[in-house]
Structure formats: structure tokens, C-alpha cells
Amino acid sequence: MITCGIITLLKKKGLNVSAFKCGPDYIDPMFHRQVLGVPSGNLDTYFTEAETLNYLLKKKAEKADITVIEGVMGYYDGLGGVLTDASAYDVARVTSTPVILVIDGKGSSLSLTAIVKGFKEYKKDSQIKGVILNRTNGMIYSRLKEIIEKETGVKALGYVPEIKDLEVPSRHLGLVAPEEIRSFQTWSETLAEAMGDTLDIDGIIALSETAPEVEGKEPEIPTLSYSVDEPKVKIGVAFDAAFSFYYTENFELAEQMGAEIIRFSPLEDKTIPEGISALVFGGGYPENYGAELAANQEMRESIRNAVRDGMPCIAECGGFMYLGKTLEDENGRKHEMTGILSGEGFPTHKLGRFGYIEAKILKDGLLGCAGESIRGHEFHYWDSTENGQGFHAEKPVGSRGWDCIFHTDTLEAGFPHFYFYNNPKLLYRFLQKAKEYHDGRRAVK
């Protein structure tokens, strides 16, 4: 909520803003893009090396006047809950970004100074330069501002009163999606109005100007080879209220490799787009739209025919369940899905196999050969009666691991979400398969 308010206030200042979210999060960047209308993406030090992460930051930041990076979890909370790796602190450290700490001030006063001091001094390179007091009032803030700055050396940049009417509701996968909040524009405008008098937005802008120049190195990216006037390979991506969990960087990488992204809706459209050579089904909330997805029989048949005809297909999490036989909603009703796979999706009412993973290929297939690996994450309250055995996933901390994912010459389907900048070759192989399918159809014609 505070990040959205700050971005809106920066836009009102006439600044061209871009944004990022630390960690494997889909919904917060959707708020940045859909509600606030600014470019957004993900920065994650588990998924990418420091040079690649800085490259991704620079690519968007150099097109903007100011970039806001939204943190994740507690500031130092990283891998396994015991390491700082992949924490918001880790991203700030790698990018040398000045940090504004947001702390909950409800029911506290002078103790907030100790909290700021502790956070700043926990790591010598904490990057913490400013603080905003959340859920407090003007009287408390006016009394603490000078004390905080004198005792900690951290700039107090305002406060935010408790605004219950503007809080974003949550559900099992986190915040509700932005399209489910009525009147986005009214929400963000009201948010900015409420924070405009209590935040030092000029101080925030001044702090951003202390950030050093971002230097990153572009990874080696293979590209598809086309003959003169040959059209690009088109990748059909399911995108609607049921399927919306995607990393923007994966799309950008596919386009850089020479593919064209075509969006379609399994909820609203009757068939897959004409002329596509591959399919991608991301995560989302298909369990909330089981009846509507089942009712669109023409679309399900179109997808089933294409995949069985050999069209390359990637399906992650919710998209994986859509390829199954049935999907049970939270009320116990089962809905027919595409039936490409025989597994049945069902609710578990708890997080399953939650968090970061490294997935190693066990069987040669669409994305690559046995022994190759890629990093990603899982986050789901639903499971399937059949999860595949094409990959083996392992947690980065601890010894837990499990087999997962269906992996054939033309299909990769399972619960893990992959971040392809971690191993671009795997995405390239998928696009190569799509081009082979595309070329084969052209030859037949």
C-alpha cells in the first residue's frame, strides 16, 4: 500500500517512474503495472547473479527518472528464514540502493528508535538511509523525528496514519489481484491524497539521487535464425483473470530471442490464436474460475487438439492444473479441464512445497537434457494426484527434495515456476521447438 502511494505521489510530481519487486512475487508487480501504469519486474538474487540482476535493473531504470524497488518479507529475511541471501537487504546490497525502512509504529513511541538503530547496525552495509513510520500519528512522529535522526543517523521521511479503508485484502496466494479492486484509479488517488501531507516526498526524491550509477552485464542470449521476410514464431500465452502469474522478464527474454508473444483468454476466447506455434499457461486462480473454464468447451478442445498434435507447451502451477482431467474448487465441486494430463487438482488448505527450488532435469525433453538445471519456486494451496517425474526439485536450505513435472519432447508441465534468466538456454530450446513446429506446418502448407 505504501509503495503504491509513493509511486503515485512521484508521478504527481511529473516524474517518469519504474518499479521492481524483490523476490518471486507476481501480484505486487501487477499493482505497479495495472493500477499505477508503470513498468515493473522482479529482482531476485537467488535467481540471478549480481551482474545479471544489475543489468535487469539498469535496463528499466535508465528509461525512467526514478525507480522504486519494493522489498519482501522482513528486511533481512532470506533463504530458509536463516540466511540473508535472496532477502530485500541482499538486493539492496548488490545494487547499492539506498533503503527506506518502513516500520510499524502502532502502540509504540521511543522504542521505534531502537528498532531503526538495530536494523541499521545489524549489517555494516545495511544501506538503510531513511525511515517511514507506518500506522502512527502526527504527534508521535513530530516527537520522534529529531530523536531518530540524532540517535541513528537515519533520515525520518514521514509517517502514514492507519488507513483501514485503503488496505488491500488478502487471500490464499497473497493479495487479491488488482483487477478485483474496484476503481483502481480512485484507490491510488485516494491513497496518494492520504499520504501526500504526511510523507516527505521531496526528501525521498533527494535520497534517490544519492544512488550510484547502476552497472550490469548482459548475459549471453541466443537468438532464433530467420530467413529473409520469414515471420517470427508466435507464442500463445494464456492471460486473463484465471491465468496472470508471469515474470515479465521471461516474456522480454523470449522476445529478445526472436519470438512474438500473443495473449489470449481461456475464459473469454473460443479457440487458441490463429498462427501460433507454442502455448504457455501460467499460474493464477483457475480454481476460482473452474465452472467458467469448464463451460468453454470449444477452447478446451482447441487446446487439447493443438497439444496432441505436437504443439510445444509450457504449463506452470494453475496452468498445469488446467491441463489435468478435473479441478476441484474450494467448495468441493469438480470441473472438467482439458484432460491432456490425467491428474486431478484438489485443494489442500495449506501451502505445499513452498518456496525456492533448484530443479534438475531427469528426463530429456522440451526444455533440455538430463542433468541440466534451473531455479524457480513453488507456491500453491492446491495439489494434483499426478505431478510428474521429469525433474527433481531440491530446496536451497536443508535436504528436502521431490520429483515433479511432466517432461516430454513437446510438453513441460508442473507446479514449479521458472525464472529463465537463471538458465536462458532452456527457454531457447522451447522456442527452437516452437520454430520447428512452425517450420513443419509451413512445409506442409
Image (spheres, helix red, strand yellow):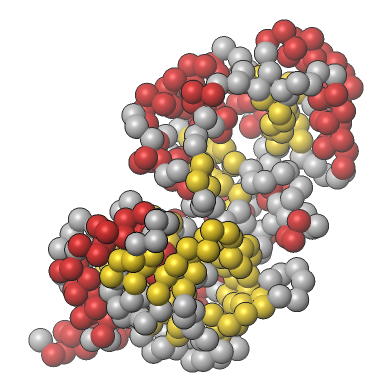
In depth, the one of 143 and 57 nearer the eye is: 143
| Residue nearest the observer in this picture, 276 or 294 | 294
Q: Residue at x 41, y 26 (%)?
A: 187
Task: Classify 403 as above or below 287.
Answer: below
- Residue at point 42% right, 56% down? 330
Please provide percent x and percent y for residue 409.
39, 89
User: The C terminus appears in which quarter of the rendering?
Assistant: bottom left
Residue 287 percent across, percent down from the top left: 38, 59
List the single residue furthest toward the front. 332
Q: In the image, is residue 353 above or below residue 308? A: above
- Residue 406: image quadrant is bottom left
Vertical placement of 5 versus 353: above or below? above
Q: Residue at x 40, y 40 (%)?
A: 178
Residue 151 appearing in the image: yes
Residue 367 left/right relative to 355: left
Say whether residue 359 is left or right of residue 145: left
**Residue extending furthest left?**
445
Q: Quadrant of the N terminus?
A: top right
User: Which image quarter: residue 177?
Assistant: top left
For residue 435, side relative to residue 138 (left or right): left
